[in-house]
Amino acid sequence: MENSSEELKNFNCLFTNYKERFIRFANTYVRDLSIAEDFTIDSFMYYWENRGTIDTSSNPPAYILTTLKHKCLNHLQSVQVRQDVSEKLREHALWELQTRIHSLEACEPYELFTDEIQKIVDRSLNDLPERTREIFLLSRKNNCPHKEIAEKLAISTKSVEFHINKAIKLLRENLKDYLPAIAYLYLFL
């Protein structure tokens, strides 16, 4: 019992003499006083709990300081890993944001919209009877007057008007969802 009391007295003396120095040492590295205090107390506790297995010729303050060093080192390596992961996540988020910005900058709604309308127009014209399509294209694409088309195809101007109106009616029907936007584009662009 006396030996145990002597051990406790020596430990208390060791704790009193080195505690503040070890806290300062740890705080130099971890830069957080509460963590430095926890690591120091844990290191002293580790020494106390393992004193029976420690070589009696060892230097107790050096043993405790080595334990404290490893705790600080593990903590700093953990902080480094978290910062590395955080940085990688930040870099990925920045890359993803820049990708969305570049994608949006490159997006030309007018061109996308025009391409879509052109596909509908092409499909609609392909659905027309051959004669109606020919008359409509002569009128709209080649800018031929009705009379010239009538003479070229040996039909009346009323027939030319009929075929053009038929094509226009089909285009209006197929483009009904786009007509407000088309009107907007022509008025404001």
Image (cartoon, rainbow, N blue to C red):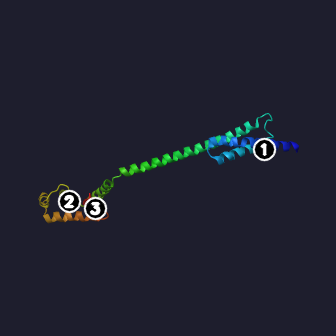
The numbered mark at residue 169 is none
Q: Earlier in the sequence, mark 1 or mark 3?
A: 1
Quarter of the rendering containing residue 159: bottom left
| Helix, strand or loop for disc 2 | helix
**Res 12 label:** 1
Q: CA distance from mark 1 to mark 3?
A: 87 Å
Q: Which residue of the protein is positioned furthest toward the right in this rendering?
A: 1
Q: CA distance from mark 2 to mark 1?
A: 105 Å
Q: State the SS at label 1.
A: helix
Spot occupied by residue 129 in the image (x, y as percentages of width and height): 24, 61
User: Dot 1: within a 10 Å radius of its alpha carbon, few (fewer than 14), some, or many (20 or more) residues?
Assistant: few
Q: What residue is shown with label 2?
A: 136
Where's the N terminus, which quadrant?
A: top right
| Crowd tier of the residue under label 2, counting other residues whose Cα lies within 10 Å: few below 14, some 14–19, many 20 or above | many
Distance from the alpha carbon under mark 3 to that under mark 2: 25 Å
The secondary element bearing badge 3 is classed as helix
Between discs 3 and 2, the one toward the N terminus: 2
Residue at image location 71% in from the left, 40% down from the top: 67
